[in-house]
Image: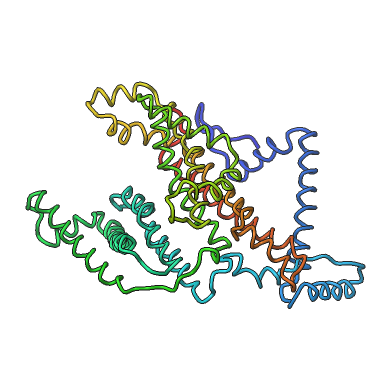
Amino acid sequence: MADVVLAEGYRPPPTVQGTWFAWLRDNLFSTWINTLLTFGALYIVYFAVSGVWAWGITNAVWEAENRRVCFDILAERAQEQGVDELTGACWAGVISWFDSFIVGRYPRGEMWRINLGGLLLVVWMVPIWLPGVRDKIYVGFSTVFLYPFLGFYLFAGGEKGLFLQVMMSLAIVVLIGNTLNGYHGVRTGRSLPAVVIAGLGMKASSDKKQRNTLLAIFAAAFALAFWAQMDWALVSVEWNLWGGLFLTLVISGIGIAFALPGGIVLAMGRRSQLPVIRILCTGFIEVFRSVPLITILFMATTMFPLFLPEGFTLNKLVQVIVAVCLFNACYMAEVVRAGLQAIPRGQYEAAMAMGLGYWKMMGLIIMPQALKFMIPNIVGNFIGLLKDTTLVSIIGLFDILNMLKAVSQDVPWRGLHKEPLVVGAALFFIICFAMSKYSRHLEETLGGGTQR
């Protein structure tokens, strides 16, 4: 039925049902060729999904003592259904090994430390996503530069030197401060320092007096945290027991945290007006970008010790983390450089006309715009870094890929290959898809990718 014209030049908007029918007609059934292709694609999807569903759900075995029992159960089902053979997934082996997929050979009695470390990281970063919270950039910087010390001791344990005790105390104080700042930001819209100053009745005091008061409170909190954790000791867990998804996230997390700031520094150095800095940064970037990551990993485990002072050693995990950080910082440098070159020259001239120096111009005007435009590329590099960490399995680290392979070497589950790899693929998909969706959210929130 034709639309009713209510006024000249006006037609009522189409209904939801009409919109869907129009979309289906225009995109899937517009011609007879498109109609055939649509039905052919639907048949392929049905064939694939039905096969996977039958293998992974309908015929799957969820409880069994070993793989031989899985075969026996499937044979009994085939006999009951009157078929010659029945194929199905043996998820019992995956369930038996699932803890190993997550933490590798980490002592099961100490897994609470990994759980606590993950919980503290979430609590630390929650204020970034809460509305009304002030100074979110400091929350991000503190997460990158302070959380690793607290997380490292939770995961590794052992004896604490003076430097580690100081950094852990700073991390504890900043974590508490970030949490309180987030609470007051959501509740009142004010920052924690403003709440403290108002609570002490010092609103009318000079800025210098307010600053000194806040520093004194911070120093007292630091001294209390240092005294509280001074006698706190955890059982040492050797790095070669770390593994599974936990190890993958540790390596990729540190790599991601270092890649962006390292890439910014290298990109700015490559565009520097000083020839020495520009040549050094350009050479460093090109060398690392011209060599595969697996070669960098082998070089890190064999060549790094030659450049260290005599008697100073780094374990293989630290060497791998350093190699991953440097490699991805060089790739990120090119992404940042592309963003800087995309900024119109007028932005630089306007910043200089306002009397801003180089660092203020880059920090307040140029770099925020460049990073906003490069969000898809930056997150794409992060996703690639997460997946590239599986290469560490080649040099003997028991990351999630090595743990997925180890199931088939276990005597009760010998030959179990497909099910663990399906689980690993699902875990990577969930993490990468979440990063991709958050990237899209940032683009929409910050306006990145819009036409200028």
| Horizontal relation, residue 312 to residue 136: left or right | right
Percent coordinates x, y for residue 317 in the rendering: 52, 56
On-image quarter of the C terminus? top left
Percent coordinates x, y for residue 314 in the rendering: 47, 55
What residue is rendered at 58% in x and 37% in y? 291
On-image quarter of the N terminus? top right
Pick whichever, 126 or 26, lies toward us: 126
Identify whether 28 is placed above or below 194: above
Q: How is the image coloured?
A: rainbow
Pick whichever, 379 or 451, lies toward us: 379
Q: Residue furthest front?
A: 310
| Horizontal relation, residue 366 to residue 202: left or right | right
What residue is rendered at 61% in x and 52% in y? 390
Q: Image quadrant of residue 311?
A: bottom left
Identify whether 261 is placed above or below 352: below
Percent coordinates x, y for residue 405 in the rendering: 69, 61
Q: Image quadrant of residue 200?
A: bottom left
Pick whichever, 391 or 312, lies toward us: 312
